[in-house]
Image (tube, helix red, strand yellow):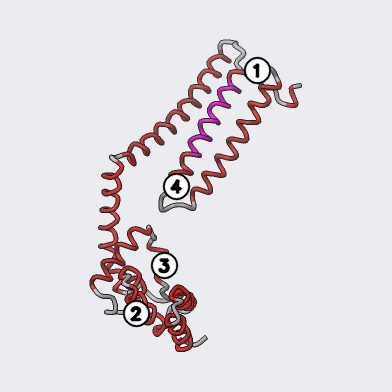
Amino acid sequence: MQEHEVVRRAAGLWDSGSRAAALTLLRDHLREDPQARQVRLALVERYRELGAPDQAGRWALAVPGLATSVERDRAARLLAASGVARDDLRAFLALPTDTPLPDEVDGLMADVDRYREQFGADMLDRTGGRGDRFGDALESTGLVVVCAWLATVAIVWGGTVLGAHLTEFARWATTAALASCAVFCGVMVVRRSIGPRRRSAIVWGAAAVVLAAAVVRLVSLGVVGDGVIRFAWER
């Protein structure tokens, strides 16, 4: 569909009251063809009519001098709040992939970084520093898991040297350590799901499921063995 046809159809939708459909039509076409200047200008004007300077600035950054100072400021706040990485800016702003970033975008990154720092400080103020305590709790949990593994290894090796039979202890201690690892992974799922790196939550979630399944299996073996974990080849 040609640019002028997209703009014409969007105008018809807009005049009929279907503003969301008009914006969607313009955005979708612009993402398919980032160099569609007429469509971009129409999209910016529609957002200006709606009184949305953040979105107007977002789509205007590709055209030199198009965004107003207020729109640039709101666009910087939007980029900071959305957590968009620099590598994802082209997709977020519907920019061509074969050209350098516009000067307007490069010049805005200092403001984006400033707003990100401000938003982070504001979040700590609102939570009373709970964000830091949450991070400390995660580190403490990880430290406990590592210490549990090291203690298990030390006890088993020490007992072996002394001639003690510590197989059952080692298996139950390993089960406890795996359970701690599963809990740690579960906490990381929660933390990553509310942060900018949401995709990593999937990895942490998969690890939590695998570890939890291993713990359930070991415990079930212990229940069947009346408190003794025995594997199939030992029966």
The foreground one among 131 and 176 is 131
Q: Element at badge 1? A: loop
Residue that appears at 47% across and 79% down = 33
Q: Name the residue under label 4.
A: 192
Q: Is residue 97 visible?
A: no
Position of the C terminus, as image quadrant, is top right
Give the crowd class for mark 3: few <14, some 14-19, many >=20 residues within 10 Å.
some
User: x%, y% of residue 157?
Assistant: 55, 19
Q: Are marks 2 and 3 in contact (CB under 8 Å)?
A: no
Q: Nearer the viewer, mark 1 or mark 2?
A: 2
The magenta stretch is 170-186
Q: Can residue 183 be seen in this view?
A: yes
Q: In this view, does 213 lie to the left or right of 125?
A: right
Residue 141 drawn above or below residue 41? above
Q: Name the residue under label 1.
A: 227
User: x%, y% of residue 110?
Assistant: 26, 62
Could you tell me the amino acid type at mark 4? Arg
Q: In this view, does 175 lie to the left or right of 122?
A: right
User: x%, y% of residue 69?
Assistant: 23, 72
User: x%, y% of residue 20?
Assistant: 45, 73
Could you tell me the amino acid type at mark 1? Gly
Q: Element at badge 4? A: helix
Q: Element at badge 2? A: helix
Q: Which of marks 1 and 4 is nearer the N terminus?
A: 4
Q: Name the residue under label 2.
A: 45
